[in-house]
Amino acid sequence: MKPQVIDLTHTIHENLSVFPGDCEIEMENVANVKDDGYSNSIVKMGMHIGTHIDGPLHMIDKAKRIDEISASRFISNAYVVDVRGCKIINRDCMHSVIGNIKPNDSVLFYTGWSDLFGKDDYYKDYPVIDSELAMVLVEKGVGIVGLDSPSPDMDPFEVHRIFMHNEVLIIENLCNLQLIPANTKFELFAFPLKFACDSSPARVVARVCN
């Protein structure tokens, strides 16, 4: 049977909501086919807009930029863990899959928070990962941690720093995780644009074998 390809990426558009304090996106069409014979647009936005990948330099001084991460890191085996209802995501929330995780695997947490994407409440009181689980994932050798929410933690962002000190990449603002069977291994493709920056928007796709 042909594998199913599932897009886990929010569309970037001019009305896309951003993390509080970040600059708003600006999109301008500067040429169109009717008048100019071609279409072109200019976009001004931060690197942490929509579905994006946080690289180590985001919060660790003199760490790697996102373009310095090997492209092989963005393809991996992955699991979705259903943690809906968990305000604090801890080891107990993912007991059913923790034993299956191998080095360089990715773990995506399905919180259900993406249902609020585009609303003010999306950036308020979202679920977070506790530091103990973050260390367990580091010890397991996980390469990428992703969530369908704005962040794995809140200020002072301890979990961010745990992951980034260990070069664990973070995907924020995923969607459609409910379409992937929980606790089932699949292939994850999560490619950021090759900006010489700390982080980048990304197109994130799952390939699931039925």
Image (cartoon, grey):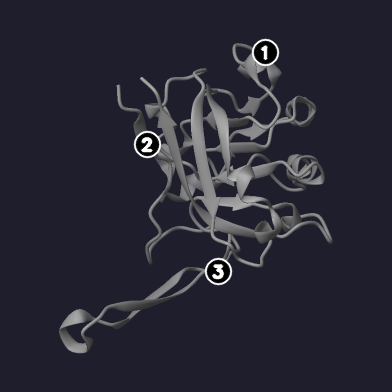
* Tag 1 residue: 99
Q: Which residue is mark 2?
A: 6
Structural distance between the alpha carbons of marks 2 and 1: 25 Å
Residue displayed at 77% across by 47% down: 156
Picture coordinates of residue 131, whole percent (x, y): 77, 31
Residue 199 lies, in percent from the top left, at 63, 58
**Local secondary structure at mark 3:** loop
* Quadrant in which the N terminus is drawn: top left
Q: Amino acid at mark 1?
A: Gly
Q: Quadrant of the C terminus?
A: top left
Q: Amino acid at mark 2?
A: Ile
Q: SS of the residue at dot 2?
A: strand
Q: How far apart, in angstroms, are the residues tagged by discs 3 and 1?
A: 41 Å
The answer to whether the residues at label 3 and label 1 have Cβ atoms under 8 Å apart is no
Q: Residues within 10 Å of mark 1 (few under 14, many from 20)?
A: few
Q: Earlier in the sequence, mark 2 or mark 1?
A: 2
Who is closer to the viewer here, 78 or 126? 78
Asked if residue 81 can be seen in this view, the reply is yes
Residue 19 visible at all? no
Q: Is residue 12 left or right of residue 61?
A: left
Q: Which mark is residue 73?
A: none
**How packed is label 3: few (under 14 Cα within 10 Å), some, or many (20 or more)?**
some
Camera-nearest residue between 54 and 83: 54
Of marks 3 and 1, which one's residue comes earlier in the chain?
3
